[in-house]
């Protein structure tokens, strides 16, 4: 073995901790430069990712003794701290003006699509899954609300995240008595809709102080030869062929519509409902335990 | 007729009742009569504030939950209520005084800054989801405010005794916070087309939620490290303030979907 190689190995051995931190820093910096296009992971890739993460959760939570760390409280707390720091960073980069000047990688300005955020988020979901698996297999009693809440959270996060790869948000500017079957995404790319939509009229109501209290648009939707007239207002979207149509702005003669195609919307809602039921159960269970403790003194 | 113009009368009435209850609760010697006096004054204050809220609702022909000033009314109401529940459950003699002082400060802000209540209602806020979303949030904020005061006291006195009250209050408050946040997500889907948009308010709501979750997990993991637990609670409460109104003072507000709150 050459002297240079031996010296190098000694340096590595002596500074193992520092090198580990350096490697992690380089990894994080590398991730912060990458912007992820969510649609690259659209069906069926998102389903494969889902299965891989479930497999990793089972592996970390139950199968592998050496990887049990990932379902431990330490791992959960580390994941919390990482996500909290990343979210605060996300908020800071929200103030574009403070950080403009080209010094920071562009991925940081659109944080939810930054590889760093996606990586941390997936780690969080896998750790959460591992905790559920561990709890499911090791703890047998007094478990139902905990599992419902945690599984609901896991389900909502997983489906919300993977579902965003299949969903599209588009905008259409409608002028009175004109119709369109195209909408445009944020990048200005035209996308065809499976129906034709036209603006019939706009109604705006103003309150005593002169501020807008209500605005809505009556639209005609033509689908396979049938024509329907519907009113779209704030908090009252119209759903047609899996597309949700929202009103964004309304003027005298034209309005801006937001059209969202989200095939996973009810799946995510199921996760949210499970989580809510779990939170409600844990709230009342807390009082029950307290009452029992009071009785026991 | 009840309106914001005569709010100061109700504020003084409720504030005085709560202050009497708070000062009586500071006494070391407790008899059944004293307990009834505390209960009586605390409830009388709540009744006075309730009369104002109901009267204002009748005048406005809607529940008063749209402006910052109106939301503060609910915060004051729930803060006094949870303050009394905390006192009754754990017998901390000082808690009623602290929650009362906090409530009085919020009422004074409402009296001194009348422009807070004269904002008109945005179309986005005219939704059935709004009432449960705000009420449950305010109730959870009140729980967290009590937790903050107890944690602060525990940190300064280096007393581990307070941590159990914090545990119970955080568990209750966090459950409510989770429900309110999720109701907001469901409402956001109906109003804006997305469950979660990562705007400034949502980021801080998520940070707050995770901080309290971190506290619960830290307590389970290291039950003896009280100081760090108290510090996590203090940071969590600060992030809650950022979520509630702190985000409004930063330039990100312009890009914020929640810029009407």
Image (cartoon, coloured by chain):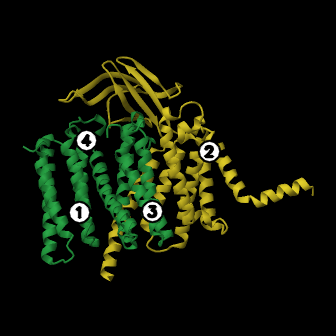
Residue lying farthest right? Answer: A1
Label 3 resides on the chain identified as B
Q: CA distance from mark 3 to mark 4?
A: 32 Å
Residue B50 seen in render: no
| Side of A217 relative to A187 (left or right) | left
**Residue A159 in the image: x percent, y percent?**
51, 49
The residue labelled by disc 3 is B215
Question: Residue B197: horizontal and vertical position, in percent?
Answer: 45, 41
Disc 2 versus disc 3: distance between alpha carbons? 36 Å
Instruction: State the residue at coordinates (40%, 65%).
Output: B155
The tag earlier along the polypeptide, 1 or 4, is: 4
Image quadrant holding the C terminus of chain A, namely bottom left
CA–CA distance between discs 2 and 1?
Answer: 58 Å
In the image, B161 versus B256, the foreground residue is B161
The chain carrying label 2 is A
Residue B67: mark in rendering: 4
Residue drawn at (59%, 45%) of the image: A116
């Amino acid at each position: 073995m050459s002297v240079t190689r031996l010296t190098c190995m000694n340096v590595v051995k002596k500074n193992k901790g520092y090198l580990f931190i350096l490697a992690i820093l380089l990894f994080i910096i590398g991730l912060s430069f990458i912007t992820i296009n969510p649609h690259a992971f659209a069906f069926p890739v998102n389903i494969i990712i889902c299965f891989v993460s479930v497999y990793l959760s089972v592996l970390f939570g139950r199968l592998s003794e050496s990887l049990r760390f990932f379902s431990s409280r330490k791992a959960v707390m580390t994941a919390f701290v990482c996500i909290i720091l990343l979210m605060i960073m996300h908020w800071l980069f929200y103030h574009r003006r403070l950080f403009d000047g080209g010094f920071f990688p562009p991925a940081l300005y659109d944080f939810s699509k930054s590889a760093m955020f996606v990586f941390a988020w997936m780690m969080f979901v896998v750790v959460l899954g591992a905790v559920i698996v561990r709890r499911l297999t090791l703890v047998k009693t007094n478990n139902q609300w905990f599992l419902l809440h945690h599984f609901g959270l896991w389900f909502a996060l997983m489906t919300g995240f993977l579902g965003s790869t299949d969903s599209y948000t588009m905008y259409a500017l409608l002028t009175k008595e004109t119709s369109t079957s195209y909408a445009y995404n944020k990048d200005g790319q035209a996308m065809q809709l499976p129906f034709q939509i036209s603006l019939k009229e706009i109604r705006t109501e103003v309150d005593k102080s002169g501020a807008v209290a209500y605005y809505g648009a009556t639209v005609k939707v033509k689908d396979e030869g049938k024509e329907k007239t519907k009113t779209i207002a704030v908090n009252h979207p119209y759903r047609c062929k899996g597309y949700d149509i929202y009103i964004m702005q309304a003027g005298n003669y034209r309005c801006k519509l937001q059209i969202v195609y989200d095939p996973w919307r009810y799946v995510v809602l199921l996760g949210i409902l499970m989580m809510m039921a779990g939170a409600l159960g844990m709230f009342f269970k807390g009082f029950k335990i307290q009452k029992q403790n009071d009785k026991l003194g | 007729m009840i309106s914001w113009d005569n709010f100061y009368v109700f504020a003084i009435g409720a504030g005085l009742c709560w202050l009497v209850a708070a000062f009586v609760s500071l006494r070391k010697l407790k008899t059944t009569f004293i307990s009834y006096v505390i209960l009586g004054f605390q409830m009388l204050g709540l009744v006075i504030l309730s009369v104002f809220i109901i009267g204002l609702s009748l005048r406005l022909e809607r529940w008063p939950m749209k402006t910052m000033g109106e939301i503060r009314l609910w915060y004051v109401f729930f803060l006094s209520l949870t303050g009394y529940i905390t006192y009754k459950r754990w017998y901390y003699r000082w808690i009623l005084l602290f929650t009362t002082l906090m409530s009085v400060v919020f009422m004074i802000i409402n009296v001194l800054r009348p422009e807070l209540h004269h904002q008109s209602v945005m179309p986005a806020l005219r939704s059935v989801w709004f009432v449960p979303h705000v009420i449950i949030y305010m109730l959870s904020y009140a729980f967290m405010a009590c937790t903050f005061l107890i944690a602060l006291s525990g940190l300064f006195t280096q007393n581990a005794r307070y941590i159990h009250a914090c545990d119970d209050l955080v568990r209750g408050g966090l459950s409510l916070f989770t429900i309110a946040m999720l109701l907001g997500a469901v409402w956001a889907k109906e109003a804006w087309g997305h469950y979660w948009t990562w705007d400034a308010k949502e980021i801080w709501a998520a940070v707050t939620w995770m901080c309290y979750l971190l506290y619960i997990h830290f307590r389970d993991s290291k039950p003896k490290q009280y100081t760090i637990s108290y510090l996590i609670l203090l940071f969590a409460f600060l992030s809650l303030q950022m979520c509630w109104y702190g985000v409004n003072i930063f330039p990100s507000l312009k890009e914020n979907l929640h810029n009407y709150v």
